Image (cartoon, helix red, strand yellow):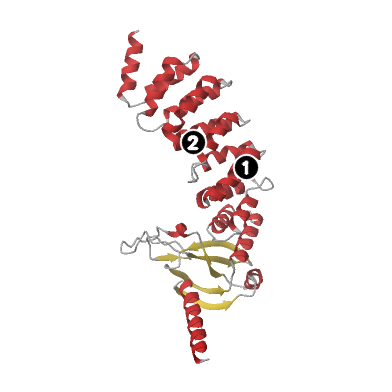
Amino acid sequence: MRHLARTLAAIAVFSAATVLAQQPQFVHARLTTVAAHGLNAELDTLKGEATPLWVGYSVPVVEKSFSSWDSRISYLEGDHPNVNDNTLNSNRSYDHAVILFRIADHSIVKIHVDNPDRQLDAGDLRVVWLTNVTPDESIANLKSLALQSDAKKLRDSAVFAISIHQSPATVPALISLASPTNDLQLREQAAFWLANQHGAEGFAALKRFAREDPDAGFREKLAFDFTLTKDPGAIGELIRMAHEDSSPQVRKQAQFWMAMKGGKVVAGDLREISENDPDTQLRKSAVFALSRLPGDEAATQLIQVANTSKDPAVRKQAVFWLGQSRDPRALDYLTKLLKQ
């Protein structure tokens, strides 16, 4: 029994130390710690306060999210420059993050996300630190904020905060925010963070949107998002969009970003589009995409198109972009053209 008691005591001490470690160091703050009995209930109560305050909690996060902070202190109030501290390890990563809400005028007006090692200067305001907040509660509250707020900065902060949670609820929440029932700006933010933070699962969601979503404006934005994901299928999806999307503007964007992401791998596809796409403007935009290929590949492909294309407009476009190139082969080719 004594052994069991010591074990339970050790577990209790460890648990208390873990909670304490997740609470950041606040300065210039009137700090109280509260065991939350439902995040929304606590926030609703605090919204009744007459004066501004901050309320925060800690959540498990995608580890890469906080790997390069280089300033020791964050100022929650007022305008203060962040001073870099080169003694800090800027490559350190964290498995938890701090989420803070500023409450004023009976509503949440600001979201601040930070790593747990930074000092937080609250500008002498009251700070309520909540324990027992679950990731699902946090995500649900942030999703509600993103859907209800008309303030772009607050909405964007809420979507970002959702994206860093290490939780099975994270990706479904972002997919829901990216759905056609929401406005384009909110959808774009959710899609961006699906690509940026969530690997294969995020890529699978974006691929479904790229193939099924009825909004060409949204699909056009997805072309860039595919350049952010590390999933190896991203290049293939950009190539598919460049060939098959029903919108010419989406196909143009896909051409450009496949060149930027795929490099030499996609040169043949772009050349094929420049030769065979039924839309003249898309054939010309494929030539522009070829001009964005890295290194000496751009000049190589442009010279080939200028020499072999059956379309005078495409050949003219290739010559134009060769004229913008710094590759010495481009100058040699243009000089030969002038002498003919």
Circle nearer the N terminus (1, 2): 1
**Residue, disc 2:** 257
- The kind of residue on which mark 2 rests is Trp
Residue at x 61% of width, y 49% of height: 186
Q: Is residue 187 left or right of residue 328?
A: right
Neighbour tally class for label 1: few under 14, some 14-19, many 20 plus, Cα within 10 Å: many
Query: x%, y% of residue 30?
Result: 50, 77
Decide: is 244 above or below 159.
above
Whether the residues at callouts 1 and 2 have beta carbons within 8 Å, the answer is no
Q: Is residue 176 left or right of residue 94?
A: right
* Local SS, label 2: helix
Q: Is residue 96 visible?
A: yes
Residue at x 34% of width, y 21% of height: 330
Q: Which residue appears farthest toward the top when viewing the image?
A: 340
Residue at x 38% of width, y 28% of height: 297
Give 146 or 136, whichever is nearer the viewer: 136
Give 119 or 258, whichever is nearer the viewer: 258
- The kind of residue on which mark 1 rests is Phe
Query: x%, y% of residue 86?
Result: 31, 61
Q: Quadrant of residue 265?
A: top left
Give the Cα distance between marks 1 and 2.
17 Å
Neighbour tally class for label 2: few under 14, some 14-19, many 20 plus, Cα within 10 Å: many
Query: x%, y% of residue 296?
Result: 35, 29
Q: Which mark is residue 209?
A: 1
Decide: is 99 above or below 322.
below
Q: Is residue 324 visible?
A: no
Q: Quadrant of residue 338?
A: top left
* Local SS, label 1: helix
Decide: is 52 above or below 303.
below
